[in-house]
């Protein structure tokens, strides 16, 4: 059972921040609670004060700027992202991944901001944000700052947020037309063992990989772009990458495996996880290449 | 530990199985304990206590949530349905009838959660494919039936509704 | 007289409890509150093996709202230990703890939050002892003894001349297999309300064997059986995890201490530390001739029974009994050892010893087939025991040939015409088969009572616990059939020892057969009395009358059962009673031999193996259950499907992982049970009904066979697909990948 705590329900961001300042490390933000409350029930964490961010108006809002930049409120639930027409339009890969988080009940209650800030390593969304070069807006007593998603999480269950700071926005740049994406998720446990998010941009003829981004999640301690693997693929032909036994694809997998920072845990040994990265990165890249391209103003897979 | 010795209670009002109700809840009280305790609705069951098994599923504004972990105060202002509210005026919901006819239950402990989750699917998507049913129901565990007869019951209702 | 067609037996009528359960109205132990009830919380040992130097409960006892804190010192004027075959389990730890999670103290308080907070205030000082976890190493000299020794039980039998036969065999195959520790995960964790009332005990508990719990409590608290009431409401899954006595003595002792009723609801984490299946290691040497004839088998098995015996004696014996499988052996030697380790005690679990033995033996059958170049199914058919043969020397002969059932499964599966369609160079498909026989039925000790009311409705009483298997329905159907009454006029009452007559247990697939016979006999006894009354009423002989639909007819006239009862008593009330007694000397003569019946396990699997990741998918699984006569066919299917799915758990995912005696994954996030996502696209059960069982209508039991064949069938299919043989479970992606890598040498 949960030990007793006091609930605070601020209606503005500054009220929420004041509460965090006042109570210091005795307080924590509470959104969906799907991860926080489990940790508190198990006795790993305890907070005497929980600050409910769902009562702050507007933090769940999903909206788009005229130039296509997508803003996602941190208090938006996974379910909201999964079914949002704006997310489907601007970043369908995110909608796809959000649909596959945990189970339907967790998606209905868990929030994207809560997920990012709890920084559970075995988690799906972070890989997509890191892939996308997303940024988050962090607000504290000293004002707001933008933090890159790949700098926000510093380790398992750790972020750069100070005790008195909170997420107030998640920002994804508009994806160029023609980007093809995939998210390959592997594992039989309740949480993912490995997630690989890939964006590929082909040339006008559809034969050459003009640009590619690969991000790994769940295996590394924090989600990680593997640029060294991307470099191997850039400029290669689609045919060479998709061929059975493709050396280029295998090389990209190898490099990603070397860089992935796997550690042994209940999901498997580090050696096996590295092997998985090596085998599945080529498959994820192939999936992206053969996916329908993203077209602005309409959704794709 | 907090220095304020007065325990905090939140006064909440919500709709429970069609009736307006109110309660005073401590912040840490789980929704399931309010429902099973104060409201004596024991159809909702606690099993894994970690949002994995679905035995504690209730519908809040039509969508399934884990009442083992969601605090009771979150029910404030919402429309809540437990298994006891699934039938209408004593007439079983088509899913309940289908489960009975298809032997889709054995010990019955997972059954309330299964029914409510299936209902939430059919309410949003009256004619799901088998893949969509399996995908939606994946978060509800059963240790007795092997799932096949539960799937058959849901498919039957989906196909029967026009 | 033409044979009467059955009205309800053989029909898939909706379950007796279905409407209650789909409405959420079915009452489980945790749904019950009794006046004045306190709430309990365990103080578990964090140490896997330690001396208890001291326990300080003063801070806990002083907390407002705490009624009592029970420790080993408080077990005065009572027996302090319990257990089924060996009473080695202390009610709460005494002097020593033998597994992580063993209750050292337990708190009773005004509510659960207070009990939990008080439990945190109990201070225990431990002196650690060396931790014993290795199954074989535990028996070596110098290993730290958990009890007087680490040997719980040993069981040996043999016949023929094994050594000579092995020496003369054309080939001898030797393989070692291991089976993991797994947990039943019945979705309702163990729950018990106990009320100690001085000269009387009452308990509501989620237990499979109410009368055995009664006997245990009676013995512990020195009270006669008639002063001990055990009530078992609906049980939210058992599978053996709630067999015998588990937390009842603890909660009753706490109730005595607290002076009020107490309810203890275990969490799933606590349930993981209450009981599990025996892990096992089997080394099998099998001698065969080149033509595939099995000539000799020599088998050494170790099973890990954890910190206390629980059902360790029987499991040690049963795993040994299941080594012959369904084959003829002229020469056989089996040696089994049940070993203590510092882990959760292992007890009954669906087909005790069956999956462990089946995993080893049926995997080796295919290894032999591959070694000899013989088709694995043909090899099995060649060596099967036939109907009428002794499976085990001195035991009941086999009721029916397995071959027809095997053929039906293979047919349904399309076995002989199968060609694998490999989706890609790295993703391979293959098929595998397994079959086994297990001795089932436990003991023929059951009674039932039927009462016909003056309005023609009937009550039927029996001790079988309803844990999902559908016993209430089956008994109602049998009663309706033999009373010759409509099913909806029958109401069943179960599992309250103050109300229903004695039944030994619910488990070992015994209830349809044995309790079914008792209900059958009780109903017939009532029907006889009805016919006798009707004979008087019509002034004729009973054999001139027809009883059906609650009426007795004679030459175009009829009289209702109710009217006959009222006539007998001369007013508006009264009743008729009928009794059923099932003992080894049952008049039908079929219960004298052991086992009560042989339960088959037959399964065929098609798998897909992704050699890149090691992931295994079961594409198709077809099994056969042999109920003799399916009283309720859909319920039988459901039992077989459930058993097979549970087996997919230990086949592909489930494993309790310990490190130095600490359980790393005692929860559903880290312990993976099958979900809807694991439902094979083709998942069929075939019912074999030859009417050859000793139960009513030729029925025999089901529910356990289905859990045995899955693991070896899947491993055999993986071998068929990839050429890689794996001898450990579960077949997780990493284990499969490693095996493939090692085999291919890459």
Image: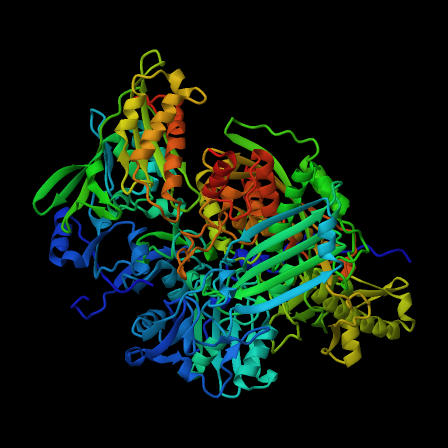
Residue A249, how many percent across, how many down?
37, 24
Q: Is residue C619 left or right of residue B139?
A: right
Between A104 and A275, which is closer to the camera in this rendering?
A: A275
Residue C111, compared with residue C221, is above or below; it is above
Between C81 and C634, which is closer to the camera in this rendering?
A: C81
Taking the image as drawn, is residue C125 in sight? yes
Residue at 88% across, 62% down: C556
Residue at 90% across, 67% down: C543
Q: Is residue C552 left or right of residue C373?
A: right
Residue B78, how many percent across, how many down?
33, 52
Quarter of the image for residue A274 reads: top left
Residue at 29% across, 74% down: C121
Residue C107, how many percent across, how many down?
37, 75
Residue B6, compared with residue C672, is above or below; it is below
Q: Is residue C100 left or right of residue C524?
A: left
Residue A95, compared with residue C60, is above or below; it is above
Q: Is residue B97 left or right of residue B120?
A: right
Quarter of the image for residue B152 reads: top right
Quadrant where the N terminus of chain A sits is bottom left
Quarter of the image for residue B144 reads: bottom right
Between B158 and A276, which is closer to the camera in this rendering?
A: A276
Q: Residue furthest top?
A: A205
Taking the image as drawn, is residue A88 in sight? no
């Amino acid at each position: 059972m949960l030990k007793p705590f006091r609930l605070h329900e601020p209606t503005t961001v500054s009220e929420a921040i004041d509460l965090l300042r006042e109570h210091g490390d005795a307080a924590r933000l509470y959104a969906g609670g799907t991860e926080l409350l489990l940790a508190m029930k198990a006795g790993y964490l305890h907070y005497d004060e929980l600050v409910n961010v769902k009562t702050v108006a507007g933090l769940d809002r999903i909206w788009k700027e005229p130039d296509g930049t997508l803003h996602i409120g941190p208090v938006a639930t996974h379910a909201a992202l999964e079914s949002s027409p704006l997310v489907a339009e601007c970043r369908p890969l995110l909608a796809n991944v959000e649909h596959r988080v945990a189970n339907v009940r967790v998606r209905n209650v868990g929030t994207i901001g809560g997920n990012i800030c709890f920084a559970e390593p075995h988690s799906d969304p972070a890989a997509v944000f890191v892939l996308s070069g997303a940024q988050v807006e962090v607000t504290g007593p000293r004002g707001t700052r933008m933090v890159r998603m790949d700098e926000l999480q510093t380790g398992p269950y750790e972020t750069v947020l100070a005790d008195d700071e909170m997420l107030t926005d998640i920002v994804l740049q508009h994806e160029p037309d023609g980007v093809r994406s995939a998210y390959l998720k592997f594992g039989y446990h309740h949480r993912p063992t490995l997630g690989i998010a890939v964006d590929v941009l082909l040339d006008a003829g559809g034969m050459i990989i003009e640009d590619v981004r690969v991000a790994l999640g769940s295996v590394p301690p924090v989600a990680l772009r593997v640029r060294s693997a991307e470099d191997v693929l850039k400029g290669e032909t689609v045919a060479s990458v998709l061929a059975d036994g493709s050396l280029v694809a295998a090389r990209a997998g190898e490099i990603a495996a070397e860089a992935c920072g796997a550690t042994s845990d209940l999901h498997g040994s580090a050696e096996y996880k590295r092997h998985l990265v090596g085998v599945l990165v080529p498959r994820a890249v192939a999936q992206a290449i053969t996916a329908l391209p993203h077209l602005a103003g309409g959704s794709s897979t | 530990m907090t220095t304020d010795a007065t325990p905090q209670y939140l006064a909440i009002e919500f709709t429970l199985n069609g009736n307006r109700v109110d309660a005073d809840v401590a912040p840490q009280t789980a929704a399931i304990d309010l429902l099973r305790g104060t409201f004596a609705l024991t159809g909702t069951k606690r099993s894994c206590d970690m949002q994995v098994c679905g035995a504690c599923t209730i519908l809040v504004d039509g969508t399934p949530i884990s009442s083992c972990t969601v605090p009771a105060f979150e029910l404030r202002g919402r429309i809540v349905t437990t298994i006891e509210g699934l039938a209408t005026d004593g007439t079983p919901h088509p899913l309940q009838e289908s489960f009975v006819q298809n032997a889709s239950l054995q010990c019955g402990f997972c059954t309330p959660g299964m029914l409510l989750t299936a209902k939430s699917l059919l309410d949003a998507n009256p004619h799901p494919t088998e893949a969509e049913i399996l995908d939606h129901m994946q978060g509800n565990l059963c240790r007795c039936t092997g799932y096949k007869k539960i799937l058959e019951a849901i498919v039957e209702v989906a196909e029967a509704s026009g | 007289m033409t044979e009467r067609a059955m009205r309800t037996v053989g029909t898939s009528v909706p379950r007796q409890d279905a409407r209650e359960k789909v409405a959420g109205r079915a009452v489980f132990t945790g749904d019950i509150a009794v006046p004045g009830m306190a709430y309990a919380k365990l103080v578990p040992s964090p140490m896997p093996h330690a001396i208890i130097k001291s326990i300080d409960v003063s801070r806990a006892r002083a907390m407002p709202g705490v009624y009592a804190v029970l420790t080993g010192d408080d077990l005065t004027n009572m027996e302090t230990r319990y257990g089924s075959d060996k009473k080695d389990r202390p009610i709460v730890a005494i002097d020593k703890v033998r597994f992580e999670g063993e209750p050292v103290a337990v708190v009773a308080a005004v509510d659960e939050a207070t009990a939990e907070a008080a439990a945190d205030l109990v201070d225990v000082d431990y002196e650690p002892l060396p931790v014993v976890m290795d199954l074989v190493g535990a028996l070596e000299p110098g290993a730290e003894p958990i009890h007087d020794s680490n040997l719980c039980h040993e069981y040996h039998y043999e016949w023929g001349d094994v050594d000579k036969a092995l020496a003369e065999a054309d080939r001898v195959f030797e393989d070692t297999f291991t089976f993991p520790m797994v947990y039943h995960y019945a979705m309702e964790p163990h729950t018990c309300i106990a009320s100690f009332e001085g000269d009387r005990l009452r308990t509501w508990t989620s237990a499979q064997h109410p009368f055995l719990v009664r006997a245990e409590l009676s013995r512990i608290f020195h009270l006669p059986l008639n002063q001990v009431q055990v009530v078992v409401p609906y049980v939210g899954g058992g599978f053996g995890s709630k067999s015998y006595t588990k937390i009842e003595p603890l909660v009753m002792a706490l109730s005595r201490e607290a002076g009020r009723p107490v309810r203890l609801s275990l969490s799933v984490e606590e349930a993981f530390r209450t009981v599990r299946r025996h892990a096992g290691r089997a080394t099998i040497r099998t001698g065969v001739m080149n033509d595939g004839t099995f000539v000799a088998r020599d088998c050494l098995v170790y099973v890990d029974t954890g910190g206390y015996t629980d059902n360790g004696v029987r499991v040690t014996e049963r795993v040994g009994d299941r080594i012959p499988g369904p084959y003829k052996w002229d020469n056989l030697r089996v040696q089994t050892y049940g070993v203590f380790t510092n882990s959760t005690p292992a007890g009954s679990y669906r087909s005790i010893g069956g999956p462990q033995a089946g995993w080893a033996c049926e995997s080796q059958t295919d290894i032999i087939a591959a070694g000899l170049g013989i088709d694995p199914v043909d090899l099995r058919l060649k060596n099967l025991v036939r109907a009428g043969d002794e499976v085990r020397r001195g035991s009941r002969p086999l009721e029916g040939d397995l071959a027809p059932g095997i053929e039906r499964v293979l047919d349904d599966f399309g076995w002989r015409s199968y060609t694998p369609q490999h989706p890609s160079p790295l993703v391979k498909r293959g098929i595998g088969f397994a079959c086994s026989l297990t001795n089932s039925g436990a003991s023929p000790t059951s009674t039932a009572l039927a009462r016909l009311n003056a309005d023609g409705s009937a009550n039927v009483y029996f001790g079988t616990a309803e844990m999902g298997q559908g016993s209430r329905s089956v008994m109602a159907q049998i009663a309706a059939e033999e009373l010759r009454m409509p099913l909806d006029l029958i109401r069943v009452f179960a599992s309250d020892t103050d109300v229903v007559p004695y039944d030994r247990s619910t488990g070992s697939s015994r209830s349809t057969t044995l309790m079914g016979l008792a209900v059958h006999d009780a109903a017939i006894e009532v029907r006889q009395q009805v016919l006798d009354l009707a004979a008087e009423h019509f002034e004729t002989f009973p054999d001139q009358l027809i009883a059906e639909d609650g009426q007795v007819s004679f030459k175009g006239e009829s009289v209702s059962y109710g009217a006959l009862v009222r006539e007998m008593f001369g007013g508006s009330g009264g009743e008729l009673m009928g009794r059923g007694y099932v003992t080894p000397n049952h008049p039908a003569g079929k219960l004298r031999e052991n086992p009560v019946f042989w339960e088959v396990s037959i399964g065929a699997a098609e798998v897909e193996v992704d050699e890149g990741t090691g992931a295994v998918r079961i594409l198709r699984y077809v099994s056969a259950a042999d109920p003799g006569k399916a009283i309720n066919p859909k319920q039988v299917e459901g039992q077989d499907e459930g058993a097979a799915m549970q087996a997919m758990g230990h086949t592909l995912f489930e494993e309790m992982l310990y490190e130095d005696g600490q359980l790393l994954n005692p929860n559903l996030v880290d312990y993976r049970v099958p979900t809807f996502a694991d439902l094979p696209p083709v998942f069929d059960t075939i019912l074999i009904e030859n009417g050859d069982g000793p139960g009513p209508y030729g029925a025999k039991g089901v529910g356990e066979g289905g859990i045995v064949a899955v693991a070896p069938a899947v491993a055999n299919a993986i071998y068929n697909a990839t050429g890689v043989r794996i001898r450990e479970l579960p077949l997780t992606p990493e284990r499969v990948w490693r095996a493939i890598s090692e085999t291919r040498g890459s």
